[in-house]
Amino acid sequence: MNFDELALLTALNAPVGFEEPVLEYMAAELQVTCDHVEIDVRGNLFARQQRDPSKPLVMLMAHADEIGFLITSILPGGFLAFTRVGFPTDMVLAGQRVQVLTSKGVLQGTIGVKPGHVLRGNEARIVPPVDALYIDVGAASVEEAAAWGIEPGTPATFYGPLTQTAHPDRVMGKAIDNRIGCLSLLEIARRIHADESQQFNVVYVVTVEEEVGLRGAELAARHVNPDVVIAVDTVPAGGTPDLGSHELPWTIGAGPLLKVRETNGLSTHGPLRKLLREVAAANSIPYQLIVDTAGITDGSAAQQASGNIAAAVLGLARRYSHSAVEVLDLRDARRLVDLVCAVLPELKSREQLLRIQLPK
Ligand SMILES: [Zn+2]
């Protein structure tokens, strides 16, 4: 789980609907360790290590897309009106640097912010809503912005290169949600590939359109028809001064998150959750058991869409969710990889996934 590869992955710009750069990277890397790589028309990527069909088929998934913006029009003076895609809050927008991804290349820009010198009374305390904001790419006119390739629907992302903090394992930047999930999948695939004795039945799935309603995962799960789904995604972390101890009672650096339930969605399959906990305990892998009342992942969509499966979500806590400065502790991701690699050999039969044993 190295900093450089996560830096590379987070530097790729892949807002919802424009995931190609991440899909291309993941396809090239998964090709090295998997027997068969395919992509559907929608953009979901599938890579298979199917070595023993008698074992349960395990689908490991992570989403490629990141939250971002779409330009809606060019304003007088060459400024850009925009809307968000996914859910960065108004609070994290004003004053941030962004990258506008035109067909002619990437334009550096910033989300403009009114000078404090002229704010009157309460105005200084109000967070400007997204529809009052605009992007400045340095264009001097509507014509100039258009000549640079900006048109309605041009996507944009935060600018937030992955940066090492003074802590050896803590990093910050944009799109940690969910490039760290993508990197975790790559690491798992590499580790299994390196060990010929491992005879599993795994499909790695890189999904699209997660940030706008788990849309790719549904389709992917129906396509793969697995026995087990484990979704890997980031989760907003608690433990900061602005959150009470009862809000998001899990932190970065204390191990991956095992969701018992997520909002309006999945309850982790009982026998699968039990197995994950036993394997974590046996291998001294710390983890945090959580009830996520704030978020939902591809795990819920896959569980619902593919029907007769055991599903779980393994989370990675990160601070400042959906901002340009998400903070992650890399140790959590290393432990998540350890946990998944340790649990795969224990998934031996479909019968072990049944919630009760029927009377003889
Ligand atoms: Zn995510």
Image (cartoon, rainbow, N blue to C red):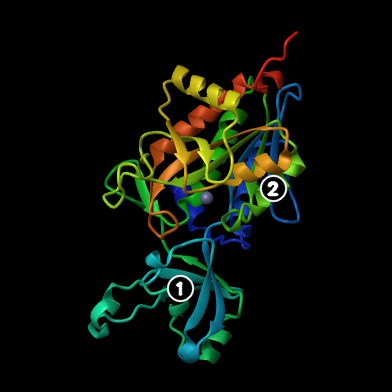
Question: In this rendering, would 82 be left or right of 153?
Answer: left
Question: In this rendering, would 3 be left or right of 58?
Answer: left
Looking at mark 1, is its residue's CB closer than 8 Å to ligand 1? Answer: no
Residue at the image position 42 percent from the left and 37 percent from the top = 332
User: The disc labelled 2 sits on which kind of residue?
Assistant: Glu
Image location (x, y in percent) of residue 286? 40, 27
Q: Which residue is mark 1?
A: 130
Q: Which residue is mark 2?
A: 218
Residue 36 visible to the viewer: no
Residue at the image position 45 percent from the left and 65 percent from the top = 158
Estimate how packed mark 1 is, as few (under 14), some (14 to 19) or many (20 or more) residues with alpha carbons within 10 Å.
some
Q: Considering only vertical position in the picture, is 296 above or below 267?
A: below
Gap in angstroms between the C-alphas marked 1 and 2: 30 Å
- Pick whichever, 316 or 169, lies toward us: 316
Helix, strand or loop under label 2? helix
Helix, strand or loop under label 1? helix
Residue 88: numbered disc = none
Residue closest to the far top: 360
User: The disc labelled 1 sits on which kind of residue?
Assistant: Val
Looking at mark 2, is its residue's CB closer than 8 Å to ligand 1? Answer: no
Residue at the image position 72 percent from the left and 37 percent from the top = 307
State which tag comes first along the sequence, 1 or 2. Answer: 1
